[in-house]
Amino acid sequence: MRNLFTALKQDTHANHSILENTFPFSIYHNNNSFDDAAYNAILQIMKLFHQATAEAVQHAADHAPLLSRVSAMINGKAVLNALNTDIQALKDDTHAPAAACSPLQAISEDPHPSSVTIPSCSSPSSQAIAAIYVWLGSSMGANIIVRRLNAMERSIPTNYYQAMAGCAKAWVSFKQEVDALLPELAESSESIIEAVVEDANAWFEYLISLAEAVGHDKNLRLA
């Protein structure tokens, strides 16, 4: 039987690579492609993701109190506050490109847009564990992104990535707690591993769909 985190790393790799190479996330592969509109798009996408996953995690913890051992590790309130702070800072910057009149605005104003739906799940517990995996996994490179943004010597707000860098400290504890939780959450370890992997891919596909919705807007495409 495979270890959950080995299975997650192997079986979500393809979607993880697709996401990294999808606009606007692809701007991090080329500093010369960076602009405020694309950065704002990333923050708006991540706000939707974090809102959706935080709700899923809270819902699961309400029904399975065991999950409280890992649900707090995402530090959801601090991350969402940091996102709102950075988005507002970009909005207040008179030099930032006007990216509001676009499909992104409709997405950011509607937490459940018809074009991009919240993924279905195998079970609330597997969805929550998968959500935390994607959330904390995305935090692992946050310190690197902060350093790269600061090196640009521009007025770029980085509160979100600083908050995510704080989340990264929970990664080892999260893996240990989940390994201990699995036998308590399901009779079959193999079945819950399959469910968590399936739900993790669903969260990645949700992010990819949000990114593609932004990328289809010519006003937000990079030159």
Image (tube, rainbow, N blue to C red):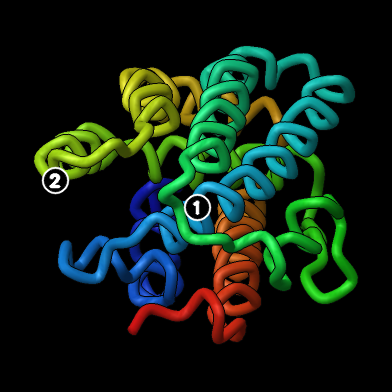
The local secondary structure at tag 2 comes to loop
Given residues 68 and 193, the one toward you in this image is: 68
Of marks 2 and 1, which one's residue comes earlier in the chain? Answer: 1
Q: Is residue 158 left or right of residue 189?
A: left
Vertical side of 53 occupied by 195: above or below? below
Q: Quadrant of residue 139?
A: top left
Given residues 25 and 73, the one toward you in this image is: 25
- Disc 2 residue type (three-letter): Met
Rate crowding at label 2 as few (under 14), some (14 to 19) or many (20 or more) other CA atoms within 10 Å.
few
Rate crowding at label 1 as few (under 14), some (14 to 19) or many (20 or more) other CA atoms within 10 Å.
many
Measuring from the top left, give residue 91's x and y in whole percent.
57, 42
- Give the residue drawn at x 44%, y 31%: 160
Q: Quadrant of the N terminus?
A: bottom left
Q: Is residue 171 left or right of residue 43?
A: left
The local secondary structure at tag 1 comes to helix
Q: Quadrant of the C terminus?
A: bottom left
Given residues 112 and 200, the one toward you in this image is: 112
Measuring from the top left, give residue 169's x and y in whole percent.
32, 19
Whether residue 171 is visible here, answered yes or no, is no
Residue placed under numbered mark 2 in the picture: 152
Whether residue 2 is visible here, answered yes or no, is yes
Measuring from the top left, give residue 204's x and y in whole percent.
55, 63
- Give the residue drawn at x 70%, y 32%: 54
The Cα atoms of the two marked residues, 2 and 1, are separated by 16 Å
- Give the residue drawn at x 55%, y 79%: 219
**Count of numbered circles on the image:** 2
Measuring from the top left, give residue 167's x and y in whole percent.
41, 23
- Give the residue drawn at x 45%, y 52%: 96
Residue placed under numbered mark 1 in the picture: 40
- Disc 1 residue type (three-letter): Asn
